[in-house]
Amino acid sequence: MKKNCGYSEDAVRQFLILIKHAMWGSPDDGCNAGPDPLDWKGILHIARKQALLPMVYDGMEYLPADKRLQGPALMQLIAYVDKVESHNRALDEAAMEISSRLAAEGIRSVLLKGQGNAVLYRNPLHRQCGDIDLYTGADNFEKAAGIIRGWPEISDEKPESVKHIGFTYKGVILELHREAYYFPDRKSNMLFRPWETEELSKDSCHVTLGEGSSKGEVTVPPVDFNLFYIFAHAFTHFMQSGLGLRQLCDLALFIHAHRGEFDTDALCSKLETFDLEEEWKLFVCFLVEILGLPQDEAPLYDGRFVPMSYKMLSRILADGNFGQHKNLPDFSRKPVMVRKMGNLILHQITYAQRIKFSPRQTWRYYRAMWRDGIKAVFTK
């Protein structure tokens, strides 16, 4: 059997079929094709690296009983899914509590990504989430951070970055954002910031989190802004460290859930403004060809990007979720100067791998890497 980044082609194909079942809820005729039994070892390995084990569990619903995972491996998967469900319930509860408490202090917040994207899934508790991202905007950021610091539920505070500051609230990570997204160059940020501020000031879109009597609404970004934001955020991860299939599932399900609502002309304008037209077409082609988004729902679909979509799949399989499984040296325990220089080299390797996907954006991120890297080398 041929290998794709260390996995058999059967394992990759079967894994993607299960993910598509979990996403769209309907079987296709490829489900029962291939070797018997399925390559469960390979499937689970891919799913673990992509943070999609609960989706594989959901996809099994469409398999014949004799092809489903059995024995201790199934018990381990069920236990893992239970943990993800519990974590999602904690995140939902915390997101509603924090939003409500800030609102009581006169601070409006907007939930970014995470639990706001989880509601797009057939089973929202099965999107493997990490933390809570809440945007308050620059005007309310310092006030909100000061209020949160005074809460008895806060057990930790992470260093402040250009975009956000981190806290631990009841055991879950909260990132409080003054800015939702940050481009690698000053010009793009100057163009983006007024649009971000205007759109995230709107109170036009809400989602319901939680279950039963604990349900509650939180504010999320308006649809057209959120479409661009989810894409741009995923693209930045792809360029800087690594992109997981989970983030592309988010984008595919968001497009599907809001099909017919997008202002395609406005999307084109924003993509042109930030030189992301080709990159969008690559991503949306990937969603159609790899993840099964209906082509007629995909804004600006361009079939010229099909071959590159499969190359992108290989890159994603190799890197793992957020690039956490890249086969590169680890400098984390080296002396400070060695660590900083080593990380600079690792970033250069990453950008060398990205050139074929986006030459112009690679150059933009590469310049930013040198700018920020040189600063970091000489900053204690």
Image (tube, rainbow, N blue to C red):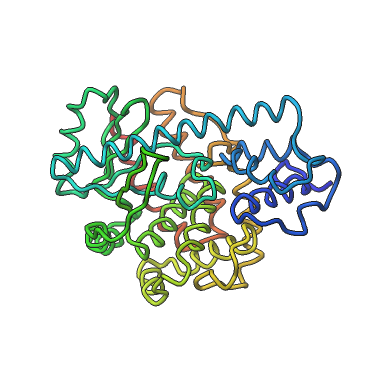
Please say if 82 is above or below 302.
Answer: above
Please say if 201 is above or below 139.
Answer: below
Depth check: give the residue in front, 275 or 362: 275
Please say if 29 is above or below 267.
Answer: above
Q: Quadrant of the C terminus?
A: top left
Depth check: give the residue in front, 35 or 369: 35
User: Residue at horizontal 72%, vertical 24%?
Assistant: 72
Depth check: give the residue in front, 64 or 149: 64
Give left or right: position of 265 versus 51: left
User: Residue at horizontal 66%, vertical 57%?
Assistant: 26
Give left or right: position of 44 versus 66: left
**What x and y, as percent, mark residue 29?**
77, 59
Depth check: give the residue in front, 138 or 355: 138
Question: Which residue of the protein is positioned furthest toward the front in this rendering?
Answer: 213
Give left or right: position of 75 versus 172: right
**What x and y, as percent, mark residue 79?**
60, 27
User: Residue at horizontal 17%, vertical 27%?
Assistant: 150
Question: Which residue of the protein is positioned furthest toward the bottom in this rendering?
Answer: 265
**What x and y, as percent, mark residue 336?**
38, 26
**What x and y, as percent, mark residue 95?**
33, 39
User: Residue at horizontal 41%, vertical 70%?
Assistant: 262
